[in-house]
Image (cartoon, rainbow, N blue to C red):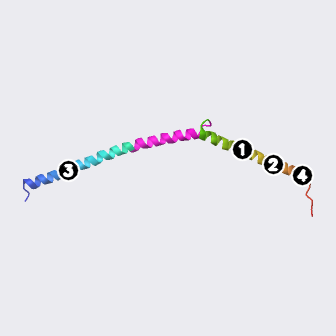
């Protein structure tokens, strides 16, 4: 039933399957290493971007600082105006019609 040629063919198929499996495993391990390196680079880039955003000397940081200062100024003006209105209402009663 099984002569030498058939056995040799099955052996060749086994060798090809084993080599293909090893090739896939090796490439997968290389891909994992590449992905890890890429993730590390992305984290580093993100850290640098956040650092530039929070640095008040750079463009983005200066804009952020300016906006924060403007928010504080507006809050102070609103508080002062509210106090002045209350003072005026207390001094001059409203006329009733």
- Name which residue lies at 20% across and 50% down: 16
Task: For mark 2, give the secondary structure.
Answer: helix
Real-space Cα distance between discs 4 and 2? 14 Å
Judge from the rendering whether residue 71 lies leftward or rightward of residue 3; answer left or right: right
Are the two marked residues, 4 and 3, in contact with CB atoms closer than 8 angstroms? Answer: no
Q: Earlier in the sequence, mark 3 or mark 1?
A: 3
- Tell me where residue 48 appears, x and y as whole percent: 52, 38
Considering every residue shown, the one lying at the far top of the view is: 57
Q: Which residue is mark 4?
A: 90
Are the two marked residues, 4 and 1, in contact with CB atoms closer than 8 angstroms? Answer: no
Judge from the rendering whether residue 82 lies leftward or rightward of residue 49; answer left or right: right
Question: Badge 3: how crowded within 10 Å, few (<14), some, or many (20+)?
Answer: few
Q: Earlier in the sequence, mark 4 or mark 3?
A: 3
Q: Does the magenta segment cover residue 62?
A: no
- Tell me where residue 40 appears, x and y as whole percent: 44, 41
Q: Earlier in the sequence, mark 4 or mark 1?
A: 1
Mark 4 vs mark 2: give the one in front.
Answer: 2
Which image quarter is the C terminus in?
bottom right
Judge from the rendering whether residue 83 lies leftward or rightward of residue 39; answer left or right: right
Task: For mark 3, give the secondary structure.
Answer: helix
Which image quarter is the N terminus in?
bottom left
Question: Residue 71 lies in what quarter of the image?
Answer: top right
Q: Compared to 22, does 57 lie above or below?
A: above
- Tell me where residue 54 appears, x and y as whole percent: 60, 39
- Tell me where residue 7 appears, x and y as whole percent: 11, 53
Q: Earlier in the sequence, mark 4 or mark 2?
A: 2
Q: Which residue is mark 1?
A: 72
Q: Compared to 41, does 96 lie above or below?
A: below
User: What is the magenta range?
Assistant: 35-56
Res 81 label: 2
Res 16 label: 3
Say which of 89 and 62 sits in front: 62
């Amino acid at each position: 039933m099984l002569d030498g040629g058939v056995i040799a063919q099955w052996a060749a198929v086994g060798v090809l399957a084993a080599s293909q499996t090893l090739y896939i495993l090796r490439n997968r391990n290389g891909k994992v290493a590449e992905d890890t390196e890429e993730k590390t680079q992305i984290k580093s880039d993100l850290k640098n971007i956040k650092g530039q955003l929070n640095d008040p000397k750079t463009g983005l940081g200066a804009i952020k600082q300016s906006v924060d200062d403007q928010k504080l100024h507006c809050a102070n003006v609103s508080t002062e105006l509210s106090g002045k209105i209350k003072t005026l209402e207390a001094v001059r009663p409203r006329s009733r019609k």
